[in-house]
Image (cartoon, rainbow, N blue to C red):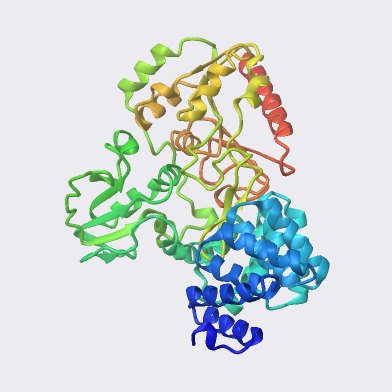
Amino acid sequence: MPPEQIADAADLLASAEKRLADGNRKGAAELCRHLLDQQPDHANAWHLLGLAEYRSGNLKFAATCIDRAIALQSDRPVYHYHCGNIYSEIGDRQAAENAYRNALREKPDFAEALNNLGLIQFDQDRLECAALLFQQAVRLQPRFTNAIYNLAMTLQALAMPMQALSLYDRVLGQMPDSAETRFNRAAVLLQIGMFEDGWREYECRFRHLPGENSRSGCQRWDGRSFHGQRLLVLDEQGIGDTLQFIRYLPLAKERGGTVIFKTVAPLAGLLKNFSGIDELCLYDDKTDRPTGADWFVPLMSLPGIFKTRLDRIPTGTPYIRPDPHKVACWEKRMTRGPFKVGLVWAGRPTAHYKDRASDDPVGIGLDLAGHPATRVADSRSRRLDFFTTLADMPGIQLYGLQKGPDAGQAEKLADKMDIINLGPDFADFADTAAAISALDLVISVDTSVAHLAGALAKPVWVLIPHAPDWRWMLEREDSPWYPSMRLFRQQRRGEWRPVFERIAEALSALLRHQAIK
């Protein structure tokens, strides 16, 4: 119906609301504008126009419209709530937080506003505050699925896995097909050592994570014998994951014929002679040659196929061996210091959900839309200046194994610490492995180099945040995956200095022991 045929403002607004509910955003905006031409101070019309523009993706204009509605009628909690949603999507956290607080001032039991304010707190690492807000929202609406889920993720980030697990179960009671919930639940199960259930739930990852989970003309391998046939194992997720789980390739090889492993170019030199691989192919091979495989399986599905329990992890190390010629070359460059310590202080920002600098948001899991949830503190990367206390210890020489943008920190700190950063000269992980083999100890954040050192059976000390990745489990100082690894855990969120103090004490004790020997 044309605007001029609608009798009064109430009918015009009702028609606009119906159009918006039907998905006709343009039509709804047209009616709102017509009403505003007649009544420029109609608060509801400004609010509805803002919603129509918001749903059309015109965020800044939408915010302007709803701000105008609030200026005309500030006691409407829904105006403030929608304003918060728009500013949150724009990325203006402070404006969003103010809007949600204004909504709650007008309506303290506004569960949706409590939930969204909780998300703002979560994004800024105010996890305890976020948990309280989510809890309040759930008390008001016991079946508020998003709030239950967000509370579960927050408790997971606070290293409270059992409470998080219970809440994920509540979400699944309402949304049994939620792959996001199952994925985060899998991480909790694996973290607490419930491997059987954890591996099963972990299979839901393919809906959201990179990697192939289907193969035209090729069946998914379930562990059966494949003698005389070809099995394609697909690399997935990060390089650290690959280095951790290639230990299963020899087990797969025992059950059949040819094992083909598809991976990324930086690992090609390191894995070309790996005992469980018959053929190596690369994702970035432009020719994309057919593999002729009869079966395929994602690499990180192998622990579940082989029914891995905590007491049945294949722990034989080293299962990666460096090129002896490369080792000799790197040993010639690493002549300083009776005790050689390699350092890694940052991961690749594109490789891991905790890889960004601590001032930027980093993921902690998947939200209910399948997007990474964000959190700012306790990123796995640290600044090199945290390691300066080690530089003053007599008898050691620090060697950097850092590549990428963060490698430049070594040059900036040249006047504070004596460190020789080899990382920029590494062509690939074959070089990294060779250099690690020439060291006495590696100290690393949670990154691929830590996995590589563990796979090489090199003594490696790893810095672990308070809420760790699932593979490091909880509380223990050793790793069930790598016998040569020692874990230095953050005892309280955001406090890394005590971790480095413990590392310095442990290194001093190790040096004294070496001197006695």
Q: Residue at x 36, y 21 (%)?
A: 327
Q: Position of residue 384 (x, y in %)?
A: 60, 25
Q: Nearer the viewer, residue 427 or 328?
A: 427
Q: Quadrant of residue 229?
A: bottom left
State which quadrant residue 192 falls in.
bottom right
431 in relation to 174, above or below = above
Image quadrant of residue 59?
A: bottom right
Quadrant location, the C terminus: top right
Position of residue 158 measured from the top left corner of the image (x, y, whole percent):
70, 53
* Residue 348 rendering spot, x and y as whole percentages: 48, 38
Q: Camera-side residue: 81 or 122?
A: 81
Q: Using the rendered image of the protein, determine whether residue 163 is visible from the camera's viewpoint.
A: yes
Residue 68 % position (x, y): 69, 63
The one nearer the camera, 484 or 396, is 396
Q: Is residue 239 above or below residue 344?
A: below
User: Quick check: 183 left or right of 260?
Assistant: right
